Image (cartoon, rainbow, N blue to C red):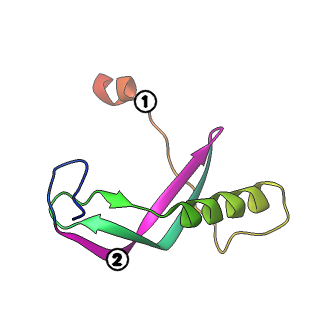
Amino acid sequence: MEQCNFCGNQQLVATTTQYTYKRDGQYLIVDDVPCTQCSYCGEAYFEARVLKKIEAEFEAIQSGKKQPKRAVTVPVEGFLELDAA
C-alpha cells in the first residue's frame, strides 16, 4: 500500500497542482500538473515522465524556441530587510 513519505498517511489521491521549476535563478510555473497528493499534509508526488516534460518545456522557453503562455513579475525580498522595518 502506498503511503506518504513525509507524514505516513495512507490516503493518497490523484489530483493536479501548480508546480514551480527552478534552475540557475530562472523559474517556470506550470499549472494543472498531474500528481498524487497526500490527503493529510498535501505532499505531492510526481511521475518522472511528468517532471521530464516540465524540464523540456523550461529548456524550450529559456532557449527562445517557445514562448510561455504568460509571464508574471514576482517581487523578491530578503528577510533581513523585512525584519528591519
Which is nearer the eye, 23 or 85?
Answer: 23
Q: Which residues are magenta?
A: 11-25
Kind of residue at disc 1: Gly
- Asked whether 69 falls inside the magenta stretch, the response is no
Q: Which secondary structure, mark 2? A: strand
Magenta segment main secondary structure? strand
Which is nearer the eye, 20 or 5?
Answer: 5
Which residue is disc 2 drawn over?
A: 15
In the picture, residue 68 is in which quadrant? bottom right
Residue at 57% in and 56% down: 73
Mark 2 or mark 1, which has the lower sequence index?
2
Residue at 47% in and 61% down: 19
Residue at 25% in and 49% down: 5
In the picture, residue 58 is in which quadrant? bottom right
- Image position of 38 with respect to 27: above or below: below
Which residue is disc 1 drawn over?
A: 78
Q: CA distance from mark 2 to mark 1?
A: 33 Å
- Image position of 85 with respect to 31: above or below: above
Q: Would residue 74 be found to the left or right of residue 35 on screen?
A: right
Q: Which secondary structure, mark 1? A: loop
Decide: few, some or many residues near mark 2? Use Cα within 10 Å; few <14, some 14-19, many ≥20: few
Kind of residue at disc 2: Thr
Residue 56, position as x, y percentages in the image: 71, 61
Q: Would residue 48 be found to the left or right of residue 66 on screen?
A: left
Residue 67, position as x, y percentages in the image: 76, 69
| CB under 8 Å between discs 2 and 1 | no
Q: Quadrant of the C terminus?
A: top left
Q: Residue furthest front?
A: 1
Q: Would residue 37 be found to the left or right of residue 21 on screen?
A: left
